[in-house]
Image (spheres, coloured by chain):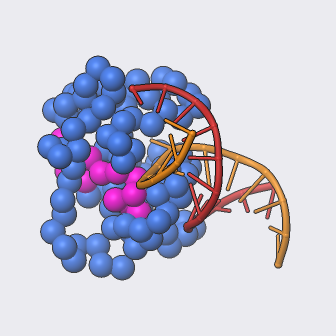
Chain colours: A blue, B orange, C red
Amino acid sequence: MATEFRSRVRAVVRAIPRGKVLTYGAVAALAGRPRAARAVGAALAAESGDDPLPWWRVISASGRITSPKVHHVNRLQRQLLTDEGTGVSEGGRVDLDRHAWRPEPGRFVP
DNA sequence: ATAGTGACTGGAA
DNA sequence: CTTCCAGCCACTA
């Protein structure tokens, strides 16, 4: 059984459109916990994969692709983003002004 | 209940 | 630009 928070995080991440991204903080906010950005990271890291989530569309507030301990995951994320049309600079950065997803207000009302 | 752990963040150095 | 640092927080042992 997943916790309430993690269920909401999944719902939000699952809704991110192709080619768009959301910061950890944004996901947290949409999930009803504006300051739980860190917990969002933990939630994604804990995902078992049985419930396919576009986890690669979640990046840091600076537009940078955060690197977990395992470096290759980072590469994969960059690859996936590039494949779906999200511009990723060489430094592994994404232009948030251009790719940040802005869901219509009230969509994830907790 | 307490302590430790990060796929976080924004500000300071 | 890069490090460092102190809050923040859900989750786990």
Residue at the image point whose x is 19% and y is 35% from the top: A86
Residue at 47% over, 29% down: A73
Task: Please tell me whether residue C4 is drawn above or below residue A90 in the rendered image.
Answer: below
- Locate the N terminus of chain A and report the quarter of the image it occupies: bottom right
Left/right placement of residue A33 relative to residue C12 reads left
Work out which quarter of the rendered image holds the C terminus of chain A and state it. Answer: bottom left
Residue A43 visible from this viewpoint:
no
* Residue at 30% across, 51% down: A22
**What is the residue that sits farthest to the top in this orientation?**
A90
**Any magenta on residue A101?**
no
Q: Please state the horizontal and vertical placement of residue A9, each as a whole percent of the image.
A: 41, 62
Where's residue A21, x and y in %?
26, 47
Query: Is residue A12 left or right of A74 when viewed as pictured?
Result: left
Picture quarter containing residue A66? top left
The front one of A27 and A47 is: A27
Quarter of the figure with residue A19: top left
Q: Is residue A100 visible?
A: yes
Where A81 falls versus A30 (above or below)? above
> In the rendered structure, which segment of residues is drawn in magenta?
A16-28
